[in-house]
Image: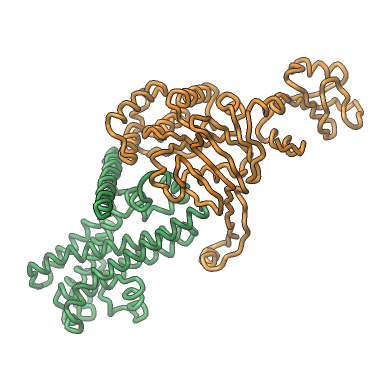
Amino acid sequence: MAIITVDSLRKSFWVNQRRAGFAGAVRGLVSRTGHEVVAVDDISFEIAAGEMVGYIGPNGAGKSTTIKVLTGILVPSSGQVTVAGLVPWEQRRTLAGKIGAVFGQRTQLWWDLPLIESLTLLQHVYGVPSDRFNANLSYFREILELDGFLDTPVRQLSLGQRMRGDLVAALLHEPPILYLDEPTIGLDVVARARMREVLQEINRERGVTVLLTTHDMDDISQLCQRMLIIDHGKLLYDGSVEAIRERYGMERTLVVDLDGSEEIEGPLELPGMTDVQQDGPRHWLRFRRDQASAAEAITAVTSRHRIRDLTLEEPDIEGIVRRIYEGGDRL
Amino acid sequence: MLGATVARLLEDVSLYRIFVGSRLRSQMQYRESFLVMLVLGFVGLTTEFLAIILLFNRFDTLIGWSVGEVAFLYGLASISFGMAELFGAGFDNFPETIRRAEFDRVLLRPQSAFVQVLSGDFQLRRLGRILQGTMALGFAFAWTSVAWSPQKLAYLPVVVLCGMVLYIGFFVLGATLCFWTVDSVEVANIITYGGTEFASYPLPIYHVLMQRFFTFVVPLAFVSYFPSLYLLGRPEASDWPQWLLVASPLAAAALFALVAWLAWGFGVKHYRSTGS
């Protein structure tokens, strides 16, 4: 059963030309010069209860705008949306009790209060009964290991601790839906892995539906079965993570700088590799992870050419989106 | 219907208390800093008041107003404005909220944006202005020979509250502008802070254009000058029907609150359609 439905969602903004100075600011109030920007362009999808879906795309693709519409913060230009049976922008306050949100870059907590006090305030904000609050708090204290910093003011927390605090803050009122915007951004490897484990547990044990945006391909491949790819406001892909991984995630790129003494025109001819781009002595060689290891690929190059330097590039979201365009793919 | 509205209102009030309580606790963690700010604020404002007294050292009256009567206007304006600063600090501080893009957070929560912003900040050190205004009012009581009837004593806090509502209205209007541009907030500040200065002196000392502006556009005169005519029993009071003087603060506050409320609603709507 779909808990989120989005049908032909469109959101455009009018971007004003800013004028300099005080007089400019006053004039800006009166006259309007600028242009329209379409942030989300005719997007449709459904998410079933209990799913964990990755929503990805480059910066400025329209991810945050979509999420803001789904939370009821923004009113769309056109299209129909229901979240938990409600129209978000018309029933914002009712919906607020049914959703939790974590925005990685911004905290929902009170900066100068101890974490525990932020959580008690949120208990009142969401009207969580004391017994539920205590039960939830002790659950999260355990899985997120909060005990070391519950009494620390939020501004003194490390980023990893703060993200854990934000996650509790978003889930104390037991929302069936959780939006995560870059939940692992800036976290170190250990904190990132821990965050993923917890998200998995919440999804599995509590049946929370999760929609997450991220730049981290590993987040997606470890957490989600399904992903939506968006760029320039349009939905490029809606399907399994596996298919994308097989098609693009397998492809790594070896970037080599050839020794200057060697004169080569055009792409290199190498077994199992495609020379997709050249720039002077620099070549971008694409190969598949399941056909050759990085060491084998390097050997294949160095046995034929003298190289001065090399780097290995793993596929990232931007790369995958670019590849979808290059191939003219509409998956 | 009415029951639900009342229940919601009570919920808002209790939430406001909870938020303010937490702000207070966090400020009390820095007790020394709080005391220093309080004293500094008090001293700073007292010099302002001393300037008025010095003025009267040279001139016995200001267009027929004695030092005690001007002290009364000054005290009234200070207490009203101080209370507005105290209770409406969230709106006073709103440009910061917009700059830090924190308004999204407000819209994520199941309360009205208005109540959340109102309770978003509470600076106890602002008590300095209220204290200082109370002191000025104390002098006014001592220096004037007004017969303070029970009606007048009961009416005084009403005027103060109406003034507070009006000043909070300014803050709300200034905050609403921030939905379009944070740069123009200084314009709003000129009116708010300039307005308290204005309200501290008798209306007729100003140019007639300014008198009209602060009577009909920004109705400050209705919460300072006009009710003071009645309270102080000034001779000018006989120019007006008494009920008009008495009712003017209530009417002005109610009307201005309505305007501010509607403007705020419009601003929030604009924000939600543009996200900026």
Tally the marks: 0
In this view, the residue in front, B22 or B244, is B244
Taking depth in this image into account, of B4 and B88 the one nearest to the observer is: B4
Whether residue A286 is visible here, answered yes or no, is yes
Q: Where's residue A173, x and y in %?
A: 36, 34
Residue B253 percent location from the top left of the image: 28, 66
Question: Does B132 sit above or below residue A43?
Answer: below
The furthest residue to the front: A1
Residue B97 vertical placement versus B247 (above, below): above
The chain painted green is: B
Q: Which of A243 and A184 is in front in this view?
A: A243
Q: Is residue B230 left or right of residue B182?
A: left
Q: Which residue is drawn at 91% across and 31% down?
A: A265
Letter of the chain in orange: A
Task: Please report the residue visible at 40 percent of the width from the left and 22 percent of the height from the top.
Answer: A145
Q: Where is residue A175 in the image (x, y as percent from the top left)?
A: 41, 35
B228 sits left or right of B12 in the view: left
Quadrant that contains the C terminus of chain A: top right
Above-or-below relation of A18 to A229: below
Q: How is the image coloured?
A: by chain
**Which residue is outermost to the bottom?**
B239
Residue B182 seen anywhere in this rendered image of the structure: no
- The residue sitting at 84% across, 30% down in the picture is A281
Q: Would you say A208 lies left or right of A323 here? A: left
Residue A39 or residue A162, whichever sits in front: A39
B143 shown above or below B33: below
Residue A172: x and y, percent? 37, 32
